[in-house]
Amino acid sequence: MQTSPLDGLHDVIVPSQVSWWPLAPIWWVIIGTLLLAIGYLSYRLYQAYQFKKAKRHAVLLSEQYNDDAPQLHILIKRLVLHYYAQSAASQGTKQWCNTLNKLTGQQFTERELMSLYQPQSNQTALANKLKLAIAQFKLKEPLNV
């Protein structure tokens, strides 16, 4: 009787479990890329938060100057001065009116703005309009007025 050549083979040995550590190089690349992306996103969000800080402060101050139209007008001037050039904040009445209309979405007239300089006039409606204008102030609008 002839012996089978397979009888001389040993049993199959199951390989041991492959360890997850140390990580393969591609995982280090993925982790590094994710950390860079999270860092960049955090930085951009922080920049946007800092950029909008002046507007948030103006909205808070507008709550204090509830019916004081001249103070609210000064707040809008300060916002325009902060986010746009000095030339935008120091325009004539007609150009300033156009700039306000463009940046706030409200419709101001020259007569309304000139009434700010009249003594003891009832400006409650104008104060409400200016307060709404501060809340709706656009931060990144091109000023080609």
Image: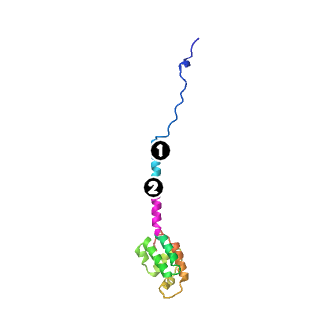
Residue placed furthest toward the bottom: 119
Judge whether 43 appears above or below 25 on screen: below
Residue labelled with disc 2:
39
Secondary structure of residue under mark 2? helix
Q: Which label number is shown at residue 55?
A: none
Q: Which residue corresponds to the image point at 46% horizontal and 43% vertical from the top-left? A: 26
Judge whether 34 appears above or below 138 on screen: above
The magenta-colored residue range is 42-53
Report the magenta stretch's main SS. Answer: helix
Q: Residue 35: image x %, image y %?
A: 46, 51
Q: Residue 138: image x %, image y %?
A: 50, 70
The amino acid marked with disc number 2 is Gly
Q: Which residue corresponds to the image point at 45% horizontal and 42% vertical from the top-left? A: 25
Colour convention: rainbow
Residue placed furthest toward the left: 86
Q: Which residue corresponds to the image point at 55% horizontal and 82% vertical from the top-left? A: 124
Q: Residue 82: image x %, image y %?
A: 43, 72
Residue labelled with disc 1:
27
Residue 144 vs residue 43, the one in the foreground: 43
The amino acid marked with disc number 1 is Trp
Q: Are marks 2 and 1 in contact (CB under 8 Å)?
A: no
Secondary structure of residue under mark 1? helix
Does the rendering let one see residue 51? yes
Residue 92 vs residue 76, the one in the foreground: 76
Q: Residue 53: image x %, image y %?
A: 46, 68
How many numbered tags mark residues here? 2
Q: Residues within 10 Å of mark 1 (few under 14, many from 20)?
A: few
Q: Residues within 10 Å of mark 2 (few under 14, many from 20)?
A: few
- Mark nearer the N terminus (2 vs 1): 1
Q: Is residue 83 magenta?
A: no
The N terminus appears in which quarter of the rendering? Answer: top right
Q: Which residue corresponds to the image point at 40% horizontal and 74% vertical from the top-left? A: 86
